[in-house]
Amino acid sequence: MENSKQMRTWLDDMKLDHPLVIAGPCSAETEEQVLQIANELKDTDVNYFRAGIWKPRTRPGMFEGVGALGLKWLQKVKAETGMKTCTEVANAAHVKLALEHDIDLLWIGARSTVSPFIMQEIADALEGTDKIVLVKNPVNPDLALWLGGIERLHSAGIKNLGAIHRGFSTYEKTKYRNIPEWQLAIEFQNKFPDLPLINDPSHITGNREMIFDVSQTALDLNFDGLMIETHFDPENAWSDAAQQVTPTKLIQIMRDLKIRKESDPEAAYNSELSGLRAQIDVLDNQLIDMLGKRMKVSDSIGALKKQKNVAVLQSNRWNAILGNMILEGESKGLSEEFVLKMFKAIHQESINHQEKIINS
Ligand code: PEP
Ligand code: MN
């Protein structure tokens, strides 16, 4: 994996000795709430204070953000705590207001990245700005759409760019709110190795209990920073209550995360090794997940065979599968011997599943 950064970026210029941390509430709710959270985060490793002002909600009737009024609160945060500020922008009017209120970093939300029209509108409104602009991945796992959004900003002369990986929505219910699809993020890093890539474990997990683990995986995969939603009273937050952590918890998370330094050769080796191991872990989990899904389909076939009173083992079908898989395997550099062994084991597990169903 090519992952050496060639160009200096806004992030290098910050000369941090730890990954970038963006924290603050999902939504700005009141002036007091914003200032209290900012004060609790000010003397920590947090680099940027976030708060959503315009909230993209899936269905109408939910809290849609306080609007431009919140920008004044963010200005107060900067004046009172010295912290840099950031918020989401979703159209040209938002951009104009955010720039007028000297917001330091703007991000584009997952529901905007999906739309080339919106991305172009935002790029035109931002033309030539020296503010930092981060693009969240689109809600659907489409790498080209994500890259396309960034290219539109780049073409508008925006130099200080970066990306945020916040996971992808699926119809299927999983333990994640938005599944990480780490492979896609790794592919993204390979396409744009010089672009800072931030992980957003809050929107990936949807659940504060899982934030630490996802953050650690991201750091092991060489992400450049984290964006973590933080609120002094998470349970009563006006949006995304289940995924926010308290400032105290955030400080604990930052303390416990293992950060791999890349300065000396030994550390560089360790860093590369743990990055590769994190990739193996992701793939192994996908393998197990796929095998589980395959067995579920096999169970349904078992149920059908039971109805029709058909034998479990059907050798024509099995020989056809094996032949195809040996050819597929060859094209991926897998030996015939390995593919045979693996599929025999999978087939045996399938037969066991189906027999259990037929005999039940
Ligand atoms: C957010 O950061 O609060 C947000 C709305 O994120 P996303 O665009 O990832 O859903
Ligand atoms: Mn949120």
Image (cartoon, rainbow, N blue to C red):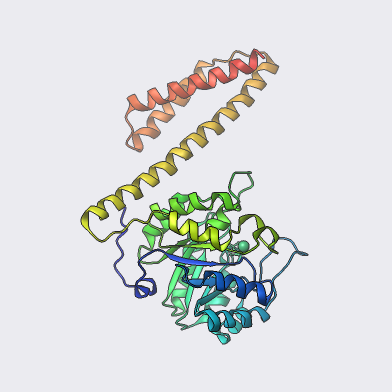
Q: Is residue 148 visible?
A: yes
Residue 17, position as x, y percentages in the image: 35, 66
Residue 214, position as x, y percentages in the image: 49, 51
**In the picture provided, is 3 more to the left or to the right than 256?**
left
Give 138 or 179, whichever is nearer the viewer.
Answer: 179
Which quadrant contains ligand 1? Answer: bottom right
Give 98 or 128, whichever is nearer the viewer.
Answer: 98
Q: Is the C terminus in the top left, top right, bottom left or bottom right quadrant?
A: top right
Q: Residue furthest right?
A: 61
Residue 218, position as x, y percentages in the image: 44, 54
| Residue sitting at x 38%, y 60% | 191
Total labels: the figure holds 0
| Residue sitting at x 35%, y 27% | 338
Eyeballing the image, is 23 above or below 273? Answer: below
**In the picture provided, is 138 more to the left or to the right than 186?**
right
Residue 270, position as x, y percentages in the image: 28, 50
